Amino acid sequence: MKSTYYVLVEPVDGKEYANQTKDGLILNVSIEDFKSTQRLARVVGVPEAMSLDVFVGEIIVVHHNVFRSNYDMRGRLKKSNYLIENSLYYVEPERVYMIMRDGEWKMFGDYAFVEPVKRSTEGYHSNSAAYVEMVGRVSMIDESFGSVHVGDLITFQKESEYEFRINEQKYYRIPTKNIVAVL
């Protein structure tokens, strides 16, 4: 299949929503909640008008709205705006975040994936938040970024994180320009 400027994909396992654990526990039944939309896609076509380091058959992580259905003002179910036909969708290259290559996740674009740091529960005063705000440990980042590396504890700009769940692990996707400092 040929594409001009978009990556053509299908949802992994044919599912638009990833709302079950490996044990079969259903986490969510609402399509309104973006956290349950499928983020894993299989590439079926790559853009011919530009050079991208993405190949047919690879698994990629995409934006949550790619497969997301919703209800319109009258309560009618509307399929994703990215749907072409059946289970074929298009994705702008800017909405591709990671690629599974040689059994490992590789970054795509100017983002870092960061594991949130759990808040200590020791002491008498504790905030109800489970994670330390604006702090995380880098799990994935493009090697060419330079001053920040996998394993570094970083702080980032407020509200620059975006939650992802990949293989039941929680990550924040952070634009690299929003990383403030290595702690």
Image (cartoon, rainbow, N blue to C red):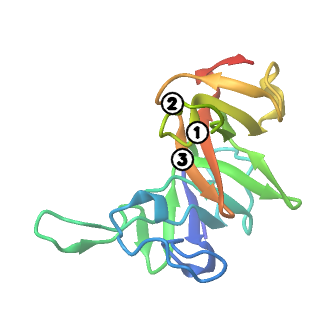
Q: Secondary structure at mark 1?
A: strand
Q: Secondary structure at mark 3?
A: strand
Decide: is 118 above or below 110. Answer: below
| Amino acid, disc 1 | Tyr
The quarter in which the N terminus is drawn is bottom right
Residue 131 x %, y %: 58, 39
Q: Which quarter of the picture shows residue 182?
A: top right
Residue 150 x %, y %: 83, 35
Dot 1: within a 10 Å radius of its alpha carbon, few (fewer than 14), some, or many (20 or more) residues?
some
> Which residue is at the far front?
124
Q: Foreground residue, 4 or 101? A: 101
Q: Earlier in the sequence, mark 1 or mark 2?
A: 1
Distance between mark 1 and mark 3 Cα atoms: 12 Å
- Rendered residue at 49%/67% (across/down): 89
Distance between mark 1 and mark 2 Cα atoms: 15 Å
- Rendered residue at 83%/34% (across/down): 151
Q: Secondary structure at mark 2?
A: loop
Decide: is 150 above or below 98. Answer: above
Residue 131 badge = 1
The residue that mark 2 highlights is 160
Residue 144 x %, y %: 82, 28
Q: Foreground residue, 45 or 105? A: 105
The residue that mark 3 highlights is 163
Distance between mark 2 and mark 3 Cα atoms: 10 Å
Residue 52 badge = none
